[in-house]
Image (spheres, grey):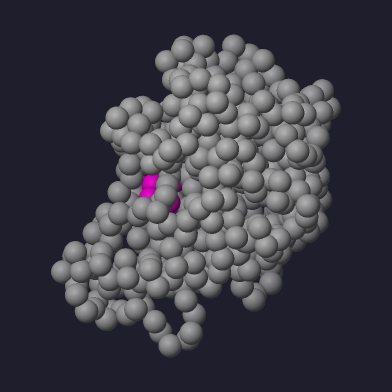
Amino acid sequence: MTRVLARWAPPVLGLVLVLSSCQDDARPVANPFVVETEYGALHGLTDDGAMVWRGIPYAVPPVGGLRWRPPEAPAPWDGVRDASAYGHSCLQGRSSGFVRALIGPIDDVSEDCLYLNVSRPTGDATGLPVMVWIHGGGFTGGTSSLSVYNSPGLVRHGVVLVTLNYRLGRLGFFAHPALDDGSGERLANFGLLDQVQALRWVQEHRGLRRRPGDVTIFGESAGGMSVNALMASPRADGLFQRAVSESGLGREPSQTFEQAQAEGQRQVASLGLVDPDAAALRALPADQVAALPVDLLGGGAPVLDDVLPSSVSDTFEAGEEADVPYLVGSNDLEFPDAFLAGGADRADGVRDRILGADREAAVEAYGTEDELDRHLVSDVVFTEPARHLAVLHATRAPTYLYRFSAVAPELAATVGGAPHAMEIPYVFDATSGQRFMVDDAAGLAATISGYWVAFAATGDPNHDGAPTWTSTGPGRLMELTGDGPRMVEVDPWSPRLDLVEAGYDRRS
């Protein structure tokens, strides 16, 4: 975006309101719902102590000839745009039953989906940090419009909250030789480019905050993976100042660009296009493209291209990721057997492939067969990779590692721990009405969301009244338990995570 803001409210008001003047009266009139953006005025609403603007276009709809191209800045509009309703969610790819169960049905979907939402507290508070949420869903599902993601509870802590959509599935992560436009650019991660464009929108709309240096990206699952990828991407350099990755993996493989192109050829051939040109690809029905599968754990998203030149783990190991304060962690039982397609039988096969002949040593590290079977997959995919990235990044910038284990007794009895996404209501201070919360869920949520907000404001999660959270060191992490946060200097899980780490080292 090269155009400058034509008219903003004084910085002390930020995004709360704009002083609008009508042509017949030069005196400014405060309107708590109308905000002027670079592209036009927006009329929002209030929601439980928050002022909200929804469905804001941050890019031109990526349809027709703009499919599989970098996002372009939106066109200006005349008059005042209604910003009381969410924009379309992005077309959903072929999600697993696990992802569908976590997210629920999403009905209003479209290829025209590059919208974001902004919330901030009512009143005239100044200098608020900006927190930009990137939703999960395996890069094939999800939306920014879930109520928990737009919680007034988090906003009332004193932040500007931005939630965004990005292209999903093969509309968002796709490569094919026919898309080579001669520019020399190798692009496949269009969903990541959408996130970069949204961050540019945030940075360039100075009315969101009082001063530069207040943008924190945070996300869970594929959103946490996105956070890690943005830290590794030169395209996102300087667009955020702090980063939070919740259950964001970190050791996952990434297809090379050539592998992604070959996969793209194979997949469109399954739709009857054996040797298409770019126009034929872009003419494919969007729902057919969205239905093409993406193998997340096989490196299908994100892939290696000019947006993400090197894998997340390789980038961190080389010390080339963004040197910003980093908060990272996982839940204590991300993937119970019941969450895996095929249940315990498939999980046994997965464990056998991971362990090979090392099961006896693994049982010793885990203590019991049951503990090994319960936690191995989660540790390999989530827990050890989070520790790995934290230890690496701690040599470059302040880093804070957590493990979340707060879970209601009935879920602990049936599942055995806190599964994937369980931390989200606590982070957003939105536990009311949620299932499987601990007894003092509201108190725990106030503490955890307070950590996240303090980190967004200062790069340090510590805040008044909460147990002290010290930065990452050997074996050190914050346990977010149902009885409250507890700082651990020597992680009792270290022997088993060391075993997992050794397995990664052997395969590298």
Question: In this view of the protein, can residue 74 be seen by the observer?
Answer: no
Tell me where residue 488 appears, x and y as whole percent.
Answer: 74, 26
Tell me where residue 84 appears, x and y as whole percent.
Answer: 50, 45
Tell me where residue 473 appears, x and y as whole percent.
Answer: 77, 39
Find the residue positioned furthest to the left: 272
Q: In front: 156, or 13?
A: 156
In the displayed structure, 444 sits above or below 89; it is above
Q: Is residue 350 magenta?
A: no
Which of the 4 image quadrants contains residue 322? bottom right
Question: In this view of the protein, can residue 315 be seen by the observer?
Answer: yes
Q: Main secondary structure of the magenta part?
A: loop
Along the horizontal axis of the image, is 373 left or right of 5? left
Along the horizontal axis of the image, is 79 left or right of 109? right
- Say which residue appears at 66% left-offset and 37% top-offset: 155
Q: In front: 41, or 70?
A: 70
Along the horizontal axis of the image, is 308 left or right of 356? right
- Say which residue appears at 34% left-offset and 50% top-offset: 92
Tell me where residue 58 appears, x and y as whole percent.
Answer: 53, 61
- Say which residue appears at 70% left-offset and 51% top-offset: 392
- Say which residue appears at 49% left-offset and 80% top-offset: 185
Quadrant where the C terminus lies?
bottom right
Quadrant where the N terminus lies?
bottom right
Q: Which residues are magenta?
A: 139-143
In the displayed structure, 331 sits above or below 380; it is above
